Image: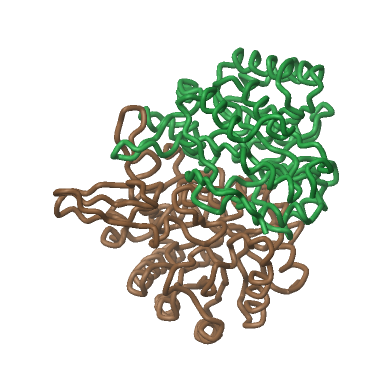
Chain colours: A green, B brown
Amino acid sequence: MNASVLPPAKLTLGPVLFNWKPEAWRDFMFRIADEAPVDTVHLGEVVCSKRAPFFDKYIPEVAERLAAGGKEVVLSTLALVMTERERDGVRDLTADSGGFMVEANDIAAAAALNGRPHVVGPFVNVYNEGTLAYLAGMGAVRVSMPAELPAATIAILAAQNLVEIEVQAFGRIPLAISARCYHARSRNLHKDGCQYVCAEDPDGMPVDTMDGKPFLTVNGTQTMSYHYLALLAELAELRRVGVNRFRLWPHHCDMVAVARSFREVLDGTLSPDAASTRLADLAPDAEFANGYIHGREGHRLVEDDLAIL
Amino acid sequence: MTAENVELVCPAGTPAALKAAVDAGADCVYVGFRDETNARNFPGLNFSRPELADGIAYAHERGTKVLVAINTFPRAGKPEIWHQAVDDAARLKADAVIVADVGLCAYAAKTHPDLRLHLSVQASASSPEAIRFYHQAFNIQRAVLPRVLTVPEIAALAADVPVEMEVFVFGGLCVMAEGRCALSSYATGLSPNMNGVCSPASHVRYVERGEKVVSELGGFTINTFGAGEPAGYPTLCKGRFEANGKLSYLFEEPTSLNTLAMLPELIKAGVTGFKIEGRQRGRAYVGAVVKAFRQAVDAIRRGEAPPDIDLDNITEGGRQTAGAYERSWR
């Protein structure tokens, strides 16, 4: 297919997975609203329900500013729902989202949205066409792919033409979620008395191997990659097989400039190589990886062209 | 729930382990086919179709049920491998299949409406709403709960859903929500969800460095052992890592779940199935653990406290934990 006949590619930003200072989060989102060339912005606490009260009060004004900036606002639900309070939160959001689209990040949230258009987030296991068809039948209109899926699988799912398929393209990769808080544990604390120590690491707490090799990152109850996912050279091939939406995970760097880089690559006005150099400048401490999309280990940086049969 | 209704659900990775579990008093044995359709897809493990037929005959003659785990997530483009596994389990008269994937649940419910479905722990159904979804959509009869819940949370859940609850009572323990962990594939390219393996042996190396032995997974150091210290298996989340300037077992110590002393509490919480982990274990291990839990459940049925049975010599690193069942674990 010729690039000129592809539908325009879209960019999704967020939700912020880290525990930023609420005012810093608000101001970050204001700037995204005003300046970032993204189509959709996700709000809502996905990782730890203990953080949500601090951000909830700013969501209306942030959502309003984003909408004024021409962005679609999507409200994301918590990934791991266990307690009464967490269940109530999902129930309230799925019952009345104030007119915003909701992203279900566990199957219970998708069930609560059954029959209404919704997004299925990357924390729901959609690995095959059977599950995709079932969720589409429940009203999913967009499905964000789990991080570990290779391009070959994503291409098969996109070819079903049932929903809009989104692929993660930038940022530390969410790898696991737990009932246990490792941020608290690293300070000899428990989750109940965590003192919100996760706020000390706005891009996550690095986890090194015993011989000093960077490996993972901890974000409260979530474990993430150390490496930053960066799909640039892969975008064209993914678009060729029907993926037209890419997600950027927010980091403590100039995300407006990051979004611009991706936008320009998708528009064909910036080469993937030049964008790669730019990302390295924007996130100078980041090491980049793209292994999963190539069907390899998630931490790998594969130089070969992505070729989907 | 009373002790009378409780079932011991026991692992069998081989026909020999199946016999050991049945002979030691298992109420149910759970098994997998010898391929990527189950979450213990290890070399030398699991059942061919004829082996499963023989195993089911052996178990059924002795009043034991056989459950077939088909609990990985079917690979796009190849769903027929997983569909065939469900068809074969139904044909061989398995008492239930244990499934996790929404699409596979839908296939099983539609194609084999009389086949009993258990929801695998890999589905990570952690709330009444999640479990009710699988029950209403696919008529799931039992849910294996993710190892993230406390006993009071399990009790609240059991009171609120129309299906049986099964919980892990012994063996290896995931510290992440099951079915939602890509740590293994990040390091090795192979994952529980896609390949049925976690921290696969094919990617493990033990390297001598001077006096020390280093255990590696996918080239990442997971732990280091001094001279004479037994080198444990490098399961990723049970490794030692440096974070916040400190070397520690950040995620979890090498330890085994052991809830022998908590069984009465779990029965009171409304649990039906007591699941023992370990399809990768040999028949001696399976026999010993099943025997211990059989004795404990029988004692509870007689109105006695569960006996204090020493399982130290077969737990990982000789250490035991009640895991997430106790709130302080979090």
- Residue A300, x across and y down, in percent: 48, 45
From what the image shows, is residue A187 above or below residue B26? above
From the viewer's side, name the closer residue of A253 and B59. Answer: A253
From the viewer's side, name the closer residue of B274 and B269. Answer: B274
Q: Which residue is painted at 78% across and 68% down in the image? A: B110
Q: Quadrant of the N terminus of chain B?
A: bottom right
When asked about the image quadrant of residue A129, the answer is: bottom right
- Residue B244, x across and y down, in percent: 36, 27
Name the side, left or right, on which A254 lies relative to B43. Answer: right
Residue A201 visible (yes or no): yes
When asked about the image quadrant of residue B101, the answer is: bottom right
From what the image shows, is residue B304 above or below residue A222? below
From what the image shows, is residue A112 above or below residue A258? below
- Residue B114, x across and y down, in percent: 73, 74
Name the side, left or right, on which A199 lies relative to A262. Answer: left
| Count of all numbered marks drawn on residues in the image | 0
Q: Which residue is painted at 61% across and 77% down in the image? A: B94
Q: Quadrant of the C terminus of chain B?
A: top left
From the viewer's side, name the closer residue of A268 and A160. Answer: A268
Name the side, left or right, on which B87 lies relative to B124. Answer: right
Residue A85 visible (yes or no): no
From the viewer's side, name the closer residue of A11 and B137. Answer: A11
When asked about the image quadrant of residue A57, the answer is: top right
Q: Which residue is painted at 31% across and 57% down in the image? A: B205
- Residue B147, x across and y down, in percent: 50, 49
